[in-house]
């Protein structure tokens, strides 16, 4: 019988480390853009560090919140994916809920420091980010159960996280920043798409109508490919004005194993490594994009 994880290892697994590139990449790209961006303001690099803390805390908070909400709804009772704290019965639901609130609290505190140094308009935006994180699978009508999860990820882990981090450092947002934010958002969406592709059978039974469930297996695989097509197009678009950004295209090499598995029709547990490969591709493309922007 396989030994169950415990202690810190259990909480690390519950934080879903394979999804953490979605938290790191927006801020890495923001640093790259801030380095090259000309501005009359003094660049506040410490705000970038705080933005990274906010981003990671929000990601972990969302993961724990999803674990709690899916667990108490019974959605995670029959999973083929990585371990869930509540669904597995290893951690009480109330404890996981508390962990989610602690993570959101950390994000709120460091976000407030950034807002006090830049603009208080970031306070309601931060509150909206936390609310969106909780309501993804929580509340009476979770929008993640209605097929809007990808939209949330694109907006908050792409546009808001990247452009917001650039603004925190430079107090300026331009068109190139927005385009780079769209690339980051698409990469984060690819992570969610392949996760939901794997979970189509279980989510269908649980009446969790994710976009993947609504679209079906075949169309979801095409959507996954489309994410990378648009990433390439946006990189090339930015590259028409800033050729060094084209270095990010080499990051697609890391996406090849995932794209190959999705095309081959991998199902269930065979898609678990694809989630990890998608995260590695997200990190590779994001880091190279950051370097290209900085140069």
Image (cartoon, rainbow, N blue to C red):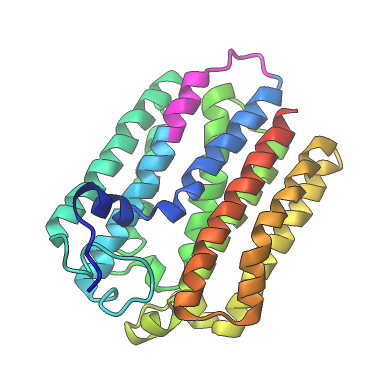
In this rendering, position of residue 99 left or right of residue 263 = left
Is 108 one of the magenta-colored residues? no
Residue 223 x, y percent position in the rendering: 63, 72
Q: Is residue 201 above or below residue 66?
A: below
Q: Residue at x 28, y 73 (%)?
A: 76
**Which image quadrant: the N terminus?**
bottom left
Residue 104 x, y percent position in the rendering: 29, 43
Q: Is residue 147 above or below residue 94?
A: below
**Magenta residue span:** 39-52
Q: Residue at x 35, y 41 (%)?
A: 57
Is 46 one of the magenta-colored residues? yes
In this rendering, position of residue 165 left or right of residue 269 = right
44 and 267: which one is in front? 267
Residue 61 x, y percent position in the rendering: 32, 49
30 and 118: which one is in front? 30
In this rendering, position of residue 54 left or right of residue 179 = left
Q: Residue furthest front?
A: 1
Q: Residue at x 32, y 82 (%)?
A: 206
Quarter of the image for residue 106 reads top left
Q: Residue at x 51, y 63 (%)?
A: 275
């Amino acid at each position: 019988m396989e030994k169950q994880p415990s202690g810190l290892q259990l909480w690390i697994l519950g934080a879903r480390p394979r999804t953490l590139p979605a938290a790191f990449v927006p801020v890495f790209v923001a640093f790259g853009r801030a380095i090259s961006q000309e501005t009359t303001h003094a660049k506040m690099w410490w705000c970038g560090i705080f933005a990274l803390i906010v981003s990671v805390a929000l990601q972990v908070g969302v993961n724990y919140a999803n674990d709690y909400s899916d667990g108490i709804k019974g959605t995670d009772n029959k999973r083929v994916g990585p371990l869930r704290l509540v669904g597995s019965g290893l951690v009480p639901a109330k404890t996981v809920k508390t962990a989610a609130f602690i993570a959101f609290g950390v994000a709120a505190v460091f976000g407030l420091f950034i807002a006090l140094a830049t603009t208080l308009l970031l306070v309601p935006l931060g509150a909206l980010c936390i609310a969106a994180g909780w309501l993804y699978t929580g509340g009476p009508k979770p929008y993640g159960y209605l097929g809007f999860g990808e939209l949330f990820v694109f907006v908050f882990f792409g546009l808001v996280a990247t452009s917001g981090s650039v603004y925190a450092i430079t107090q300026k947002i331009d068109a190139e920043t927005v385009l780079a934010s769209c690339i980051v958002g698409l990469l984060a969406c690819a992570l969610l798409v392949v996760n939901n592709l794997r979970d189509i059978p279980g989510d269908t039974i649980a009446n969790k109508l994710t976009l993947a469930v609504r679209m079906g297996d075949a169309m979801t695989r095409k959507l996954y490919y489309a994410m990378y097509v648009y990433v390439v197009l946006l990189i090339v678009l930015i590259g028409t004005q800033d050729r060094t950004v084209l270095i990010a295209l080499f990051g697609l090499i890391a996406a090849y194993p995932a794209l190959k598995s999705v095309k081959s029709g991998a199902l269930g547990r065979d898609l678990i490594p694809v989630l990890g490969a998608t995260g590695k591709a997200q990190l590779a493309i994001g880091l190279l994009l950051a370097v290209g922007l900085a140069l």
